Amino acid sequence: MNNRQLPILTRRPTGALPVAIILVTACVVVACAAPPPRTAAERTSDAVIAAQVEAALLADPTVYAWHIDVAVDRGVVRLGGYVWSVQDFRLARQDAASVAGVKTVQMDLELMRGGLAGTSR
């Protein structure tokens, strides 16, 4: 049986239509994956949480927090920057998690070897 005898429904579609369908489907999936923009109330709440987390970090006398950056998105706190001990890493997470309104804490902190002196020995 050659291609001329096959019914139209069994042939593989060719041309621009299948490609267009795939591209439209991919665009819809990507558009749905992005979170909606934050509302003014969410931005205000996140700013308040960020200020409270920064205050909690700076108020803790056991953590050197001057090199820790705080970012908040919908109650999810991201701590970035540097700490000089594993204890500072752990305590920074605890201090951030203790603030009201914090849902989770993402740790993007780097542990610098050698402490404040900057030596690795």
Image (cartoon, rainbow, N blue to C red):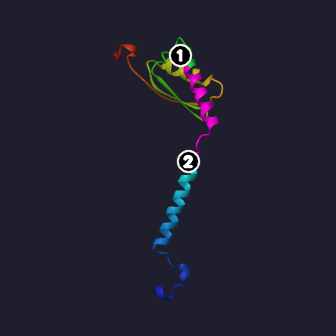
Establish if 51 lies above or below 60. Answer: below
Residue 47 in the image: x percent, y percent? 58, 29
Question: Which one is nearer the viewer's eye here, 15 or 38?
Answer: 38
The number of callouts visible is 2
Which residue is the site of mark 1?
58
Q: Secondary structure at mark 2?
A: loop
Q: Quadrant of the C terminus?
A: top left
Instruction: Out of 61 and 48, give the one closest to the viewer.
Output: 48
Spatial CA distance of label 2 from label 1 is 34 Å
Please say if the residues under marks 2 and 1 sit with CB atoms less than 8 Å apart: no
Q: Main secondary structure of the magenta part?
A: helix
- Residue 49 figure quarter: top right
The extreme top residue here reads 61
How packed mark 2 is, by other alpha carbons closer than 10 Å (few <14, some 14-19, many 20 or more), is few
Considering depth in this image, is 56 or 117 the residue closer to the camera? 56
Residue 17 in magenta?
A: no
Residue type (three-letter) at the residue carrying disc 2: Ala
- Residue 102 x/y as whole percent: 62, 29
Q: Callout 1: helix, strand or loop? A: helix
The boundaries of the magenta stretch are 33-54
Residue shown at 55%/53% (left/top)? 31
Q: Name the spot of residue 113 as percent of width and height, x first.
A: 39, 20
Q: Nearer the viewer, residue 93 or 68?
A: 68
